[in-house]
Image (spheres, helix red, strand yellow):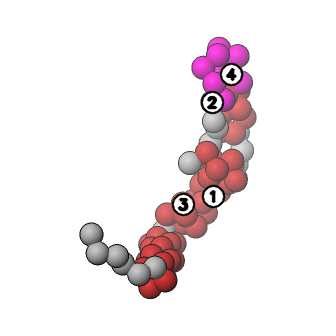
Amino acid sequence: MAAIIREWRVGVLVEGPEPAQISAALDALDELNQDPELPARCRRAAEAIFSLDAGTEAYRALFSEVLAESRAAPISPA
């Protein structure tokens, strides 16, 4: 999730538990909320990452990888 937040600039990460770190994150969040492009960027990120098309492609790639590995490695009896 941190990579998505950083790459798409759709949120703020708190870098640690110290009061100064929390304060910095709150300041960054206030600034982010002033960005008029934030809603559109959030929607683009959601569509690109979590859409049905993106999900089915990710599963297709995963299943292809698993099948390729199972064909390459013989299964030994238990």
* Residue 58 inside the magenta-drawn segment: no
Identify the amino acid type marked 3: Ala
Which residue, as the protein is rendered here, is positioned at the far bottom?
71
Residue range in magenta is 14-24
Mark 3 or mark 4, earlier in chain: 4
| Cα separation between marks 2 and 3 | 21 Å
Q: Secondary structure at mark 4?
A: helix
Tell me if mark 2 has few (under 14), some (14-19) or many (20+) residues whose alpha carbon lies within 10 angstroms of its own: some
User: Alpha-carbon distance for marks 1 and 3?
Assistant: 10 Å
Residue corresponding to mark 2: 14
Q: Residue at x 62, y 52 (%)?
A: 4
Q: Which secondary structure lies at badge 2? A: loop
Q: Which residue is mark 4?
A: 21
Nearest to viewer (mark 3 / mark 4): 4
Query: Is residue 58 shown above or below 42?
Result: below
Q: Are marks 3 and 4 in contact (CB under 8 Å)?
A: no
Q: Amino acid at mark 1?
A: Ala
Query: Residue 55: x, y in percent?
Result: 46, 70
Q: Residues within 10 Å of mark 3 (few under 14, many from 20)?
A: some
Give the Cα distance between marks 2 and 4. Answer: 6 Å
Mark 2 and 4 residues: CB-CB less than 8 Å, in contact?
A: yes
What is the C-alpha distance between the residues marked 3 and 4? 27 Å
Local crowd size for mark 4, using a 10 Å CA cut-off: few (<14), some (14–19), many (≥20): some
Residue lying at 70% horizontally and 16% vertically, measured from the top left: 20
Q: Earlier in the sequence, mark 2 or mark 4?
A: 2
Residue 54 appears left or right of 21: left
Residue on which the image places disc 1 = 40
